[in-house]
Image (cartoon, rainbow, N blue to C red):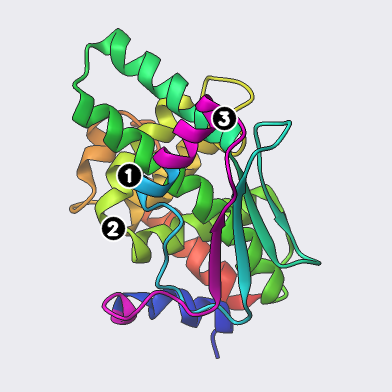
């Protein structure tokens, strides 16, 4: 019998038309500076903190001012925290990249929204893993993030792989930095449906030599979660 978390992830596509999860309470705390206020608006407008996933227990999501640019999961409080300073860092970094590439405003917005969605789903991965008794860790949270993102926000999958690839070489962007981590995340997304998400391989966001094996990687992750 599959692990209940796997059953939850695999059944998400049948619940996407339902109301947002009643187990998720999102709060945007007041911003303490013009830059934080801009970040708050970016996060709200992105819709990144919305999900239709049915959570096993209530979870609080708090967006707030913080001293550090980070996103965290507090298991004792069952609380996800997204810092405006991290949102600002993602915004400024991706905007700078887009300006260098002479990308249009629509492309920049799509990248930023997707990156913020990945941040949320990574923390949601920590939450779901903890509440279902899975071993915690950044790799585990990333795997769960890929699975939930695929079911919860399929229209952002390609942009998510692109945004994370663009941020991979920039240090200090919590949960979005790291070339190897970015390639693994992109591989899982691509492997879920290579035909539908072919742009991930075409864009080079997953290494060319790895792309043919991504479907197997994706299936192994699903099986591993189911066996835990």
Residue 97 at x, y percent in the picture: 37, 16
Residue, disc 2: 154
At horizontal 22% and vertical 33% (from top left) the residue drawn is 202
Above or below 213: residue 149: below
Query: Of tags 1 and 2, which is closer to the observer?
Result: 2
At horizontal 28% and vertical 39% (from top left) the residue drawn is 200
Which stretch appears magenta?
14-42
Query: Of tags 3 and 1, which is closer to the observer?
Result: 3
Residue 212 is marked as 1
Marks 2 and 3 sit apart, C-alpha to C-alpha, by 22 Å
Q: Tell whether 147 sits left or right of 140.
A: left
Query: Nearer the N terminus, badge 2 or badge 3?
Result: 2
Check if mark 1's residue and mark 2's residue have beta carbons within 8 Å: no
At horizontal 35% and vertical 79% (from top left) the residue drawn is 19
How many marks are shown on the rendered structure?
3
Q: Secondary structure at mark 2?
A: helix
Residue 114 at x, y percent in the picture: 36, 42
* Residue farthest toward the top in the current orientation of the protein: 100
Q: Secondary structure at mark 3?
A: loop
Q: Residues within 10 Å of mark 2 (few under 14, many from 20)?
A: some
Marks 1 and 2 sit apart, C-alpha to C-alpha, by 21 Å
Residue, disc 3: 177
Marks 3 and 1 sit apart, C-alpha to C-alpha, by 24 Å
Residue 21 is a magenta residue: yes
The quadrant in which the N terminus is found is bottom right
Check if mark 3's residue and mark 1's residue have beta carbons within 8 Å: no
Q: Residues within 10 Å of mark 1 (few under 14, many from 20)?
A: some
């Amino acid at each position: 019998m599959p692990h209940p978390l796997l059953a939850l992830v695999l059944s998400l596509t049948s619940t996407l038309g339902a109301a947002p999860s009643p187990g998720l309470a999102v709060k945007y705390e007041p911003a303490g500076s013009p830059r934080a206020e801009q970040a708050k608006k970016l996060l709200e407008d992105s819709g990144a903190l919305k999900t239709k996933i049915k959570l096993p227990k209530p979870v609080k999501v708090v967006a707030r001012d913080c001293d550090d640019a980070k996103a965290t999961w507090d298991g004792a409080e069952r609380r996800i925290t997204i810092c405006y300073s991290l949102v600002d860092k993602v915004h400024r970094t991706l905007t700078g990249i887009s300006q260098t590439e002479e990308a249009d405003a629509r492309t920049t917005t799509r990248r930023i929204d997707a990156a913020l969605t990945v941040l949320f789903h990574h923390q949601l991965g920590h939450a779901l893993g903890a509440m279902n008794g899975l071993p915690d860790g950044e790799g585990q949270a990333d795997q769960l993030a890929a699975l939930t993102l695929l079911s919860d926000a399929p229209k952002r999958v390609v942009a998510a792989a692109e945004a994370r690839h663009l941020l991979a070489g920039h240090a200090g962007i919590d949960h979005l930095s790291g070339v190897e981590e970015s390639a693994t995340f992109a591989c899982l997304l691509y492997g879920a449906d290579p035909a539908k998400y072919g742009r991930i391989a075409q864009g080079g966001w997953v290494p060319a030599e790895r792309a043919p094996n991504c479907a197997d990687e994706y299936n192994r992750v699903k099986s591993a979660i189911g066996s835990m």
